Image (cartoon, rainbow, N blue to C red):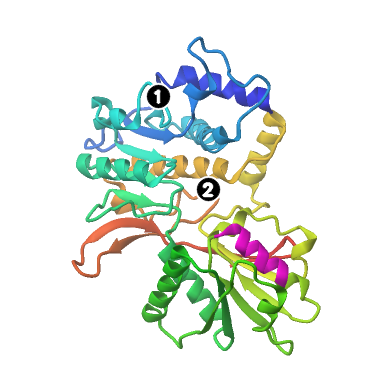
């Protein structure tokens, strides 16, 4: 696997200076005159090529493969699958790949270049808020759509119809969680376990806002702030052995969330418990025995059905070529580049009018909606509002809603 990954990086070193071009071979007579002959797509990803190779092009890490390179590279691996698919379908696209961790060409310098002005679509796997802000501002100034694949932040976007967030933001996640609990556990008292912290206060505010804006009877939510060294008794004080307890863990702290689940699982023989977690819980290993005995839910805008034929094909491709399983970011790269590449090819640069088009779906369903500033009633940006709710028991997926 590491050898194959190094080969991909070497290929990217050569590719990064060029573009991937592919087009239809049949007549263009049927295409609208208003569309350019070929559309340009810029893909931004943290590939760390300068870190991986020295000036002579020699790989720096011998037989090792550093983990920090993985997310960007996995995103690119998925993008490559999309490119191969679109190439076979005859789409008219030129794909330009940019390493956002390039030392020789920093992102700020790149975004000021003339070549970026020629793009029709920007798609980015972004690492931090500053990077997202730069791309959001550039998209607005050049009126080029920017698709933020992974970072769930608004990035200061105001009155910007060229910005699309695919990974749903925390306000959207909290509103979705509230509605799910209201639909399924409306008569239950929801015990909300939290810790002290600014992020936890923000989450509470988001749930309060969701309560105000959601129709129906408000949930009975009992907030419990646990200290750093909380014990099993601190948990069971709020549980009832005569009914199913519904608990919400309102913290993004992974360690805290796992501690709460572990304590609830430890008393599962006496207390029946359903736990709603945070969207970050998709990465938790709930197969461990310490989590046995409780129902666990979490929300996510991205869900890959393991029985899906295309997903099985991707798994086989990785098993054969990389002796591994594809990560979530591989699927994300595949479906994002494929979906929005098709929207661009079909509708041109003004793809905002077709964001609701679902015929290019691969793995997950997008529900991209405008986010309106309630004070000015202007469109600030677009966001994917689709949430899946995954139910796990003893580490096994039992249902997806």
Q: Is residue 193 left or right of residue 3?
A: left
User: Which residue was labeled with disc 2?
Assistant: 362
Q: Which mark is residue 65?
A: none
CA–CA distance in space, label 2 to label 1: 35 Å
Of the two numbered discs 2 and 1 in the rendering, the one whose residue sits closer to the viewer: 1
Q: State the residue in front, 317 or 277.
A: 277
Tell whether position 262 is magenta: yes
Secondary element at tag 1: loop
Magenta region's main secondary structure? helix
305 relative to 181, above or below: above
Residue 109 coordinates in the image, percent (x, y): 29, 28
Residue sticking out furthest to the top: 56
Q: Position of residue 108 (x, y in %)?
A: 30, 32
Q: Position of residue 152 (x, y in %)?
A: 43, 54
- What range of the chain is rendered magenta? 253-263
Which of the image's four quarters has the C terminus?
Answer: bottom right
Give the position of the N terminus as an image quadrant.
Answer: top right
Answer yes or no: is residue 106 visible.
yes
Sequence-earlier tag: 2 or 1: 1
Q: Residue at (55%, 64%) from the top-left corner? A: 278
* Picture quadrant where residue 25 is located: top left
């Amino acid at each position: 696997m590491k050898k194959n990954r190094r080969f991909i990086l070497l290929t990217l070193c050569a590719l990064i200076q060029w573009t991937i071009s592919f087009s239809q071979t049949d007549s263009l007579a049927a295409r609208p005159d208003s569309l350019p002959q070929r559309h340009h797509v810029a893909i931004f990803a943290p590939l760390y090529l300068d870190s991986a190779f020295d000036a002579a092009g020699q790989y720096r890490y011998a037989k090792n493969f550093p983990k920090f390179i993985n997310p960007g590279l996995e995103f690119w691996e998925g993008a490559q699958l999309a490119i191969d698919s679109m190439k076979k379908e005859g789409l008219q696209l030129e794909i330009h790949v940019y390493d956002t961790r390039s030392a020789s060409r920093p992102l700020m310098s790149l975004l000021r270049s003339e070549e970026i002005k020629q793009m029709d679509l920007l798609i980015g796997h972004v690492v931090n808020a500053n990077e997202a802000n730069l791309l959001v501002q550039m998209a607005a100034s050049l009126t080029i759509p920017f698709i933020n694949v992974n970072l769930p932040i608004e990035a200061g976007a105001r009155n910007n119809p060229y910005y699309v967030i695919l990974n749903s933001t925390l306000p959207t996640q909290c509103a979705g969680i509230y509605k799910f609990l209201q639909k399924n556990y409306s008569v239950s008292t929801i015990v909300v376990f939290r810790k002290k912290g600014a992020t936890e206060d923000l989450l509470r505010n988001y749930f309060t806002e969701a309560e105000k804006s959601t129709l129906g009877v408000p949930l009975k939510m009992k907030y419990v702030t646990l200290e750093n060294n909380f014990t099993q008794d601190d948990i069971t004080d709020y549980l009832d052995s005569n009914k199913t307890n519904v608990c919400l863990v309102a913290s993004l702290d992974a360690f805290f969330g796992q501690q709460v689940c572990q304590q609830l699982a430890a008393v599962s023989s006496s207390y029946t418990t359903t736990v709603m977690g945070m969207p970050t819980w998709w990465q938790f290993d709930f197969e461990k025995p310490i989590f046995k005995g409780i129902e666990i839910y979490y929300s996510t805008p991205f869900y890959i059905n393991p029985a899906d034929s295309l997903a099985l094909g991707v798994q086989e491709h990785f098993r054969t070529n990389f002796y591994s399983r594809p990560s979530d970011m591989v699927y994300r790269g595949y479906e994002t580049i494929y979906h929005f590449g098709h929207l661009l090819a079909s509708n041109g640069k003004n793809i905002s009018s077709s964001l609701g088009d679902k015929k290019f779906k691969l793995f997950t369903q997008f529900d991209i909606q405008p986010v309106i500033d309630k004070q000015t009633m202007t469109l600030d940006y677009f966001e994917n509002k689709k949430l899946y709710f995954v139910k796990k028991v003893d580490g096994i997926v039992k249902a997806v809603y």
